[in-house]
Amino acid sequence: MSSERLVIRGGKRLVGEVSICGGKNAALAVIPAALLTNDVCTIENLPDIDDIDVLSQMLAYIGAKVTITGRSMTIDPSGVDKSEVPADLASRIRGSSYFLGALLGRCGHSYVPLPGGCNIGQRKMDQHFKGFNQLGAVVKEYEDAVEVESDMLVGTEIYLDMPSVGATVNILLAAVTAKGDTIISNAGKEPHIVDLANMLNAMGARIRGAGTNVIRIKGVEKLHGCTYMIIPDQIETGTLMIAAAATGGDITIHGAIPVHMEALTAKLFEMGVRVYEGDDMIRVVSGGYHRAVNIETLPYPGFPTDLQQPMAALLTCAHGTSTINETIFENRHQHIAQLVRMGADADVNGRIATIRGVEKLHGAQIVATDLRAGAAMIVAALMADGISEIENVHYIDRGYEHIEDKLRSLGAQIERIIV
Ligand code: EPU
């Protein structure tokens, strides 16, 4: 079987201008929301990535009519006649779990094989199930699937044990058309949760407080169609910011939302990187000398777990010793072993990675062990002397749109090959 690899000759400064596409995780939450009406919804600014492909196949399987024109997806869910999703699709992406909340809200039943996504930790779903239960649904957990069912969902107060992104999204999807009021306390505050609430409100939902840790939902009987443009991808933005710093570059990123990037911007400042912000642009300028920093991943607005992996690559050549404490996922340091193969001086002890800065990385044959580990490999290869070959590119394609084209337009020497 053939597979694809990215081949990168490191050492080129990234310079120039680049645009950001719509957010992967926003798209994964917003697209299933279209199932909560029988009208047509159009979602604009979608990224061209594999996860969105899988989601559109899932929609088509359950009977929705999906039309994709450029970056817009039009969903006509009036023909939906199934509330079960096939395992071969569902298991490929984490976002398939949002069909649980969306189909439960739509038709009172949903059967979804356990969601896939990156192998970065246990990724439990107990808070999703607690929320569904408290809204009046019965949750059946099978060995490899979940089924939820309810005659009538009734609003209630739900306290999340941790501000889970997925549980907040799923509960929002189920609760918008429940009878009465729902309050989600200790809710996730991520920008894509706000995006989902905005889309649902554009469909006639009554949600307040998204973006704070208490979200209040007044159940409505019916939602209607809408046209909605999703927010730019803050992880793509952050990855490019880190890549620019890593190469001592000077890039301007258009179409980004600077306020979403504050935790990263603050760390880059601390390292000695200059970051300039405009309304929807960010310029990153680096002189190539970086100080070591300590990072602790936290729910938004803390430092995003999705950016600690590319950040680890940047820190391999910073002056001094850095630590990264990954508090969200228990197995998100697999990329460190790959960085060591490239000459990094780093080790992992439980949730903490310690990185002692070295002069230079060297090119190597490396593996993307998950999506953001793939981003870390790209950053490391861009910094390294010589040629690197990154395997498992399919992980990277799940979340980054034509990454090699964007990097090449900024001056990187990067090629995709089939082996
Ligand atoms: N958790 C539980 N019980 C639950 C839900 C979560 O114990 O019911 C735990 C998880 O095991 C994890 C932590 O809480 O340790 C956070 O999980 P969360 O639910 O917030 O994450 P998620 O919804 O599974 C989303 C993104 C991830 C991103 C995290 C954190 C999507 C589709 N995925 O995952 O994105 O890392 O939030 O911000 O939105 C990525 O894009 O590479 C990615 C992995």
Image (cartoon, rainbow, N blue to C red):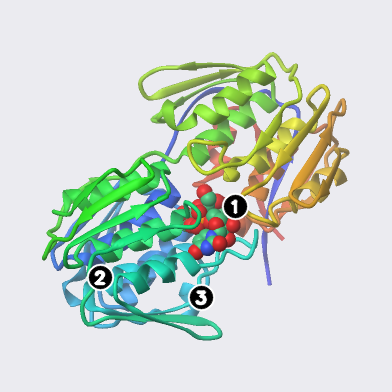
Residue 247 visible in the current orientation: yes
Query: Disc 1 or disc 2, which is closer to the eye?
Result: 2
Residue 383 visible in the current orientation: no
| Above-or-below relation of 92 to 213 | below
Q: Which residue lies at the image location 17% right of the left edge and 63% below the top edge? A: 180
* Residue 79 location (% of width, % of height): 18, 77
Mark 1 and 2 residues: CB-CB less than 8 Å, in contact? no
Residue type at mark 2: give it.
Gly
Whichever of callouts 1 and 2 sits on the residue coming sooner in the sequence is: 2
Between the C-alphas of marks 3 and 1, the distance is: 21 Å
Q: Which mark is residue 396?
A: 1
**Residue at numbered disc 3:** 114
Query: Disc 2 or disc 3, which is closer to the eye?
Result: 2
Residue type at mark 1: give it.
Ile
Question: Neighbour class for label 1 at 10 Å: few (<14), some, many (≥20)?
Answer: many
**Residue at numbered disc 2:** 105
